[in-house]
Amino acid sequence: MAASLKGLRVTSIERGSPAFRAGLRKGDRIAAVAGEPVSDELELRFFSAQVYVPLRYFRGRALRETVARRREGEELGVVVARRPVKKCANACLFCFVDQMPEGLRRSLYIKDEDYRYSFTNGNYITLSRTGPEELEHIALLGLSPLYISVHATIPSVRARLLGSSRAFDIMRQMRFLAEHGIRFHTQIVVCPGINDGVALKKTIADLLSFKEDLLSIAVVPVGLTRHRVTPLAPVTRSIALRLCAEAGRVGDAQVKAQGRRVVFCADELFIKAGLPIPVKSYYEDYPQIENGVGLARQLMEQWRELKKSIKANRTLQGSAKARVLSGAYLSITSVSASSFVIRILRELESFFPGIEIKTAVVPNDFFGRTVTVAGLLSAKDVMHAVKTLGGGRRYTAVFLPDVMFNANGVTLDGFSPRRIERRLNMKVNVISTLSQILEIVRGKQ
């Protein structure tokens, strides 16, 4: 991978680190490490993974050379400027970014197609414009596992979905990766009438041919908002039933033959189909949890363990009663999670007579009522729900699901928990586990 002539700019350096001891300083530009040109942080870390690290760098226009010596467990000690994110050049029929309204955080409109972030963050990429040189680079750095959006392995179907006839042959790309030790998680976003039916069966069969190099397949329903322009058929109850049955048959056969399941349906499909959420063993080690596969089961397992703990500790339960006798709380949930959340919180109430936990099921007016997951709830919809579904009452606290917020603690429409709190004039708690709710109603938080 060719490096910039000016190299990687050092934005900060740890005093006393190997790079600092070798003479590097903030503002220098690293051109090569161990004789290899570097163009991003992953290359820098890969080529510097040795005791003696030859470095070639620019200070101003002068090219210099030095050797950094790393003690056991030491990092090189430099932070470099990030290379711009590689943008997606597809025009996918189902692209969620294209279905978003104006006025959201700028970062939400970035269509990422960067294998670096697939490896480091689990972002899904299509590999549609990832050529042989980049594939070789992925193999050289050992960037495994990757997260790959396959959608269809029939070239004409995949081209239609991606809105591009220039996409590389995905099966050939994945074969190359597998041959070079790169394993992958995959996803299939199902668009009815396009990549379901025969196309879906072939896609799954093709992916299963990779055997141990294939870590998982997530079958996910297409997400449609009220802002989309091009019509696209939704996944209906009958289609969801068929998808769950097809994926279930393949998965069950795998378990019998290989002792593990790699084909999973998103929770949303089971909910749409009106089917019970599968048992814990169905999800193996939850390889697709970030893709909405197993969140409901994980929530139910959390409650099962927490309930056992409450029952086993009657003294704790008694002190909690006294402490929160008049507490009234409002829990916010999405449509898709509502049946599980309502049932669990009613049970929790029964252990602590005197407290009240009301659940507000928030319809998504921001994106449209067809969007039902908690991760796409806006602060505006939530605040409206608190004022209307909450009955206009003041609550001891309002519980918000943590998936509403990004890593910086901000909602899709730019609200922090504190800003929501000020607007509601009520205490707001961001909840990631059920045990947090228990601690709050017991007065421990």
Image (tube, rainbow, N blue to C red):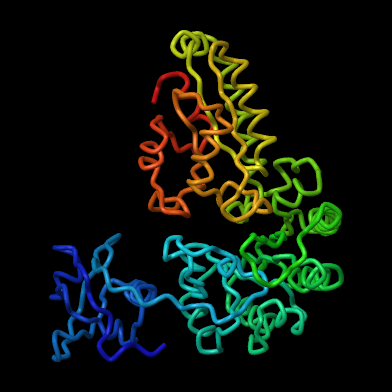
Say above or below: 437 vs 189.
Answer: above
At x 45%, y 38%, the residue is 430
Judge by depth and name the residue closer to the eye, 128 or 302: 128
Say above or below: 328 vs 419.
Answer: above
Q: Position of residue 162 (x, y in %)?
A: 66, 78
Q: Position of residue 69 (x, y in %)?
A: 21, 71
Q: Position of residue 252 (x, y in %)?
A: 82, 53
At x 30%, y 83%, the residue is 34
Judge by depth and name the residue closer to the eye, 425 or 436: 425
Say above or below: 369 vs 223.
Answer: above
Q: Is residue 335 left or right of residue 46?
A: right
Which quadrant is the N terminus positioned in?
bottom left
At x 62%, y 40%, the residue is 298
Q: Position of residue 383 (x, y in %)?
A: 49, 40
Q: Is residue 28 left or right of residue 206?
A: left
At x 53%, y 78%, the residue is 88
Q: Quadrant of residue 299?
A: top right
Which quadrant is the C terminus positioned in?
top left
Judge by depth and name the residue closer to the eye, 189 or 378: 378
Q: Is residue 278 left or right of residue 184?
A: right
Q: Quadrant of residue 276?
A: top right
Judge by depth and name the residue closer to the eye, 141 or 339: 339
Query: What is the number of callouts on the image?
Result: 0
